[in-house]
Amino acid sequence: MTDHPYQLVAVEFTAADQARLAGFSCGNEAWSRHVAEWIRGSDVLDSMKRGTRVWLFENTGGEIVGFGSVGRTRWRWPLPDGSYTSILLVPMLGLDARFRGQPPDAEWRFARQIMSHLMSAAREMSRDAATQSGKAIDWLVLMVHRENHRAIRFYEKCGFELVTGVMRHGDHLVMKLWIGEPRD
Ligand SMILES: CC(C)(COP(=O)(O)OP(=O)(O)OC[C@H]1O[C@@H](n2cnc3c(N)ncnc32)[C@H](O)[C@@H]1OP(=O)(O)O)[C@@H](O)C(=O)NCCC(=O)NCCS
């Protein structure tokens, strides 16, 4: 592992870590408050009971910069009315608001480091699925509030594309990333 000053370390999240999250805030927008409430409350624990993996990401000073999660679920795919198919889902991801857009060097951007970790974990879970059931999982999916333009732009930079014509929970767009074998 590199010891670059901006390198984040992923720590598998447990319920005991919630004691460290008292001051954790992703910002004041309604969706940002929801993200912080998710990791600080019971939703994250319920999600982990369903198999979701969750990590905190710490900087070299031991501060919690953000968190991310990946879980497996079944959705109709392709949306909205395909047959039920296993997909990998990012249930929640957030940065402490102090670290948005940081560091300025895009190569070390914290949010990008978190997403890279989630993508690697998703690919590993896809390979595990292939070993267990003979079928890899091809899509990594997430939902984002339609007015959360900053997050939408961030996900686009990470390679996610919008699923057009589909809305979940009334006001959330769906974005997808291919994680299966390379396609022609
Ligand atoms: C979403 C999040 C993880 C992204 O991390 P980040 O450090 O802010 O992301 P970046 O700065 O690397 O990228 C954001 C991009 O959006 C752009 N942006 C900022 N405000 C914007 C706006 N109002 N409209 C469009 N783009 C916007 C930025 O300029 C940047 O693009 P650029 O690199 O091309 O300039 C972080 O902002 C966050 O945790 N937000 C609160 C919680 C949240 O929304 N979580 C996601 C729930 S689905």
Image: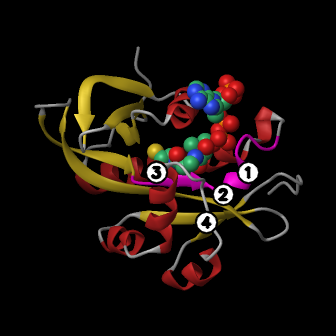
Which residue is the site of mark 2?
A: 96
Q: CA distance from mark 2 to mark 4?
A: 11 Å
Look at 32% across and 52% down and name the residue there: 129
Q: Residues within 10 Å of mark 1 (few under 14, many from 20)?
A: some
Q: Which residues are magenta?
A: 91-103
Look at 41% across and 53% down and name the residue there: 125
Left or right placement of residue 63 versus residue 17 in this view: right
Give the amino acid type for the residue marked by disc 4 in the picture. Leu
Give the amino acid type for the residue marked by disc 3 in the picture. Ala
Which residue is the site of mark 4?
A: 56
In percent of width and height, residue 134 lies at 25, 47
Which residue is the site of mark 1?
A: 99
Q: CA distance from mark 4 to mark 1?
A: 14 Å
Quarter of the render that holds ligand 1 = top right
Look at 59% across and 84% down and name the residue there: 19
Which badge, 4 or 3, comes first in the chain's sequence?
3
Q: Are marks 2 and 1 in contact (CB under 8 Å)?
A: yes
Q: Residues within 10 Å of mark 3 (few under 14, many from 20)?
A: few
Nearest to the observer: residue 100 or residue 85: 100
